[in-house]
Image: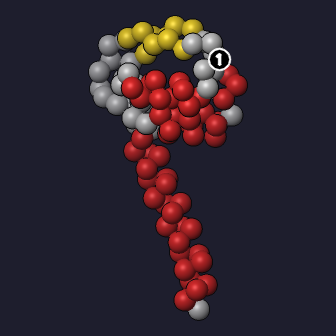
Amino acid sequence: MKKVLLFFIIPILIFTIGLYWFSLNSKPVSDETKLRDFLVIKGSSASQVGNKLNKEGFVRSGFAFKLYVQITGNTKKIQAGEYRLSPSLSLS
């Protein structure tokens, strides 16, 4: 009985913690609305773009960005170019 209970509780617990982590990391970095330039180099992967966004202060987590792009099916839609972004933008 205990094994069956753990079999259901552990995955639910892991899912809940993961969902909480993702919701925290998909929020805007700050309330700053000033636009700054951001460059996506041709051939950059979602992971590379996410890490660069994180490093430059546009997202809380590069990994959360990569997950969001993969979940929404936008991995192939990342286009090279120069963008004007604000840290007040959420992942969506």
The percent position of residue 3, horizontal first and vertical second, equals: 58, 86
Q: Which residue is mark 1?
A: 43
Q: How is the image coloured?
A: secondary structure
Answer with left or right where residue 48 lies relative to residue 86.
Answer: right
How many marks the image carries: the answer is 1
Q: Is residue 48 above or below residue 67?
A: above
Q: Is residue 88 visible?
A: no
Residue 34 shown left or right of residue 43 in the figure? left
Instruction: Inspect the image, locate mark 1, and give the three-letter code of the amino acid beneath it.
Output: Gly
Which element is circle 1 on? loop
Q: Between residue 86 and residue 78, name the one nearer to us.
A: 78
Q: Residue at x 56, y 68 (%)?
A: 11
The answer to whether residue 73 is visible is yes
Please determine whether, in this image, residue 55 is positioned above or below residue 84.
below
Number of residues whose C-alpha sits closer than 10 Å to that of mark 1, classed few (under 14), some (14–19) or many (20 or more)? few
Q: Nearer the viewer, residue 48 or 60?
A: 48
Q: Residue at x 49, y 67 (%)?
A: 13
Side of 87 where 49 appears, left or right = right
Image quarter of residue 61: top left
- List x then y, in percent, for residue 74: 66, 29
Residue 55 x/y as whole percent? 39, 26
Residue drawn at point x = 52 percent, y = 7 percent:
82
Quadrant of residue 81 within the rendered picture: top right
**Quadrant containing the N terminus in the rendered view:** bottom right
Q: Residue at x 47, y 34 (%)?
A: 62
